[in-house]
Amino acid sequence: MRPLLAATALLVAACQKASPPQGAERSTPSAQPVTIRMVYGSEKKTWLEEQLRFFEASNPRTSSGRAIRVEARALGSGEGAEGIARGTLQPHVFSPASSAYLTLLNRAWLSTAGRTQPIAGAAEPLVLSPVVIAMWKPMAEALGWPGKPLGWSDLIAVNAGGKGWAAHGRPEWGAFKLGHTHPEFSNSGLLSVLAEAYAGAGKARGLTTQDLSAKRTRDFIVRVEGSIVHYGESTGFFAEKMLARGPGYLSAAVLYENLVIESYGKAGAAFPLVAIYPVEGTFWSDHPYAVLDAPWVGGEEKEAALRLQQFLRARPAQERALALGFRPADPSLPMGVPIDAGHGVDPKQPQTLLEVPDAAILEALLDTWRATKKSADVILVFDKSGSMEGAPLAAAKAGARKFLETLGDRDQATLLFFDQEVYAAVGPLPLDRGRAELLQRVDQVSAGGGTSLYEATRTAYVLADQRARADPGRIHAVVVMTDGKDESSKLTFEGLRAELSHPEREAPVKVFTIAFGARAQKDILAQIAEAAQGKSAAGDLDTIVGIYRDMGAFF
């Protein structure tokens, strides 16, 4: 057979073999894209979302010719690790804010019977940012910055003796007020408490369970945590609200260096923020990129994930990270603006890096924190009006139960039900003994009547304020849930908001609000929360339990 005829015959045969049956759609290896699911720490959301758009615009493909797509979800590092370990999240790539969460994830993963291999292996960093204490520049200067290296000991000394900033000649600033996230939800919170433990133990590495149980260490953590205004699930929340609410809300917050830099591009701040790199030592937030070794990660997903990793660590993406205030993972890139004094940071810092211990020590650290953290006294305000009848009431009960279960045994809680009336408070009850009674009261409530939201919120606020004055050593807060608008109160919205706004008070009660369902007035509830320096959230039948759980992170 002639070569041309032979080639033609082979081509025809190949086409016939590849043709689908009559009536079926033709498919090719590139018809269905490979979709990479990624869960990542929300701290790098701006940079990562931008780079993912650029990645997909570059038309990336696997070696078999399939297009690569990415579905990325921003979560708190602790929430992401917990979801993967439980199986409620099944990403191909996990990129928390710190490698510490890979350690915790592997420990949780291996605790399930039948699992013998870690799910997260060695991972390279995407970007870097040191954990810092962000402080208003005048307050840092009052402590001796920038000439004097500052640390945790300097911060706890401000409130020693009960004088607060008056000991530094600034009585109008009141007490030193600190914010950091909840260490079980957020990377910066975990590393904050770990840094406190190292400082209390007088070490930079080799932390042991004996160190954590030592009186010296625990007393030190108690003193630091005693300055806490409240906890939270998001480092970004503290950065945003610190800038918006000013020094009366927080004197300092544990943030990432890139968030201090980012603050210089935002208008309206009372003063500039500066980064304090604790003299006792701090950590890099290294944002590792871990391709998971899990049953749902196939060969092509792994190949595609590695292609994405290569893209994110390439020079253009790293240069963009630098422009946004991150330190590049590529050491060959020179650092310059904005990693400079003009943006409140020091490129020569940190000088002392602390060691991240193994998972057993991290778990022991969390146990220590639960025993030493600032305890909370929370009033849970529950809408039982007629519009809550049926599925809404059942979902709200499940959410309230989750909230009460999230609080610690050293906390105490009160229930305040309302419809067109505001009912007598149940509590306060210490949760180590009274949790079961509160859960039972939630389970047994029924719906009916109108909605007296403003009166109920004021009643709870007044009760919380009285308790805050009598017991200032706790976090005092009100959490309000409603599915509708006020229709029964004599008190107006303007009157309520005026009562909640006390900027001159040293430790005002925080009010957190939950707008449940489409009828709830989200804007009104957001204004109520902002007036009392809390937070507002919105949920529906599917999300209300998660919303309540997230609210628990503030305490």
Image (cartoon, rainbow, N blue to C red):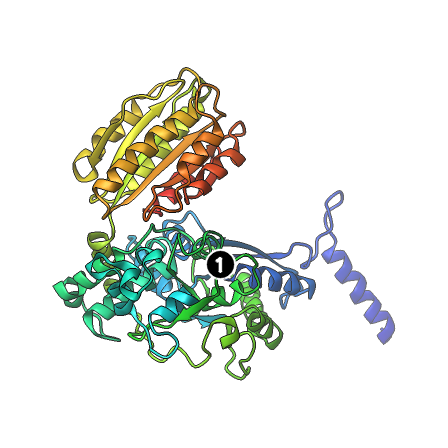
Q: Is residue 52 visible?
A: yes
Above or below 175: residue 514: above
* Location of residue 333 (image quadrant): bottom right
Compared across the picture, whether 416 is left or right of 11 comes to: left
* Location of residue 346 (image quadrant): bottom left
Residue at (41% x, 66% y) in the render: 138
Q: Position of residue 49 (x, y in %)?
A: 59, 59
Helix, strand or loop at label 1? It is: loop
Residue projecting furthest to the top: 449
Residue for badge 1: 270
Callout 1, which amino acid?
A: Ala
Q: Position of residue 207 (x, y in %)?
A: 22, 70
Q: Residues within 10 Å of mark 1 (few under 14, many from 20)?
A: few
Residue toward you, 252 or 246: 246
Residue at (37% x, 26% y) in the render: 456
Q: Is residue 358 visible?
A: no
Residue toward you, 92 or 44: 44
Above or below 261: residue 346: below
Q: Position of residue 452 (x, y in %)?
A: 42, 22
Residue at (33% x, 62% y) in the render: 170
Q: Position of residue 142 (x, y in %)?
A: 35, 69
Above or below 320: residue 363: above
Q: How many numbered marks are there?
A: 1
| Quadrant that contains the N terminus | bottom right
